[in-house]
Image (tube, rainbow, N blue to C red):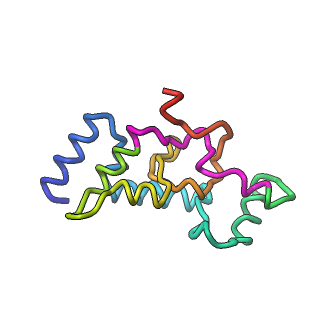
Amino acid sequence: MNFRNLINIIEAVEKGCPPATQDIDLNLKNRKKAINEYMYGPLDPNEPNEDYWAKVADEWNMDDTDQAKTALCGNCAAFDLTSKVQDCIATGIGAEAGSDPMDTVDAGDLGYCKFLKFKCAAKRTCTAWVEGGPITDEEQ
């Protein structure tokens, strides 16, 4: 990590940004833990992923994978979609000339998991899912 990146991370954290929104290595470490310990997935949520959903349904003692498919990061009580956090994610992504990091945030429907401390996509899930979300500006 170069000196300028370190300063950017410190400034963002001082503004209240979660560290994993600014530090890709920390985000990847936390995401790997989510994958390994909490079944974060599926890899490509636009595919059927029947084996993945069957494992999640089994983990939650459900008979129906369709029911499991309704429990997504996007409706989890730990999924932070506030404008502040989305700005933090965009800041962490950075902008190349001619690009807008919010395009990436929007394309991935990215938010921040307050439980597992990483950027995550609304169409995925994990076994730490809790009903009642997402966290939005209206709740702040």
Is residue 69 on the magenta stretch?
Answer: yes
Residue at 41%, 39% in the rendered image: 83
- Picture coordinates of residue 46 (x, y %)? 61, 69
Q: Is residue 50 above or below residue 123?
A: below
Residue 126 is left or right of residue 24, and the answer is: right
- 137 or 135, nearer to the observer: 137
Q: Residue furthest top?
A: 140
Q: Quadrant of residue 54?
A: bottom right
For the point 15% across and 59% down, the residue is 2
Q: Does residue 23 belong to the magenta stretch?
A: no
> What is the x, y in percent for residue 36?
56, 61
Q: Is residue 81 left or right of residue 126?
A: left
x then y, percent, for residue 114: 49, 41
Decide which of 10, 106 is in the foreground and name it. 106
Furthest residue to the right? 63
Give the answer, above or below, for where 42 lies relative to 84.
below
The residue lying at 42 percent from left, 58 percent from top is 29
* Farthest residue, direction front: 98
- What's drawn in magenta, residue-wise? 67-85
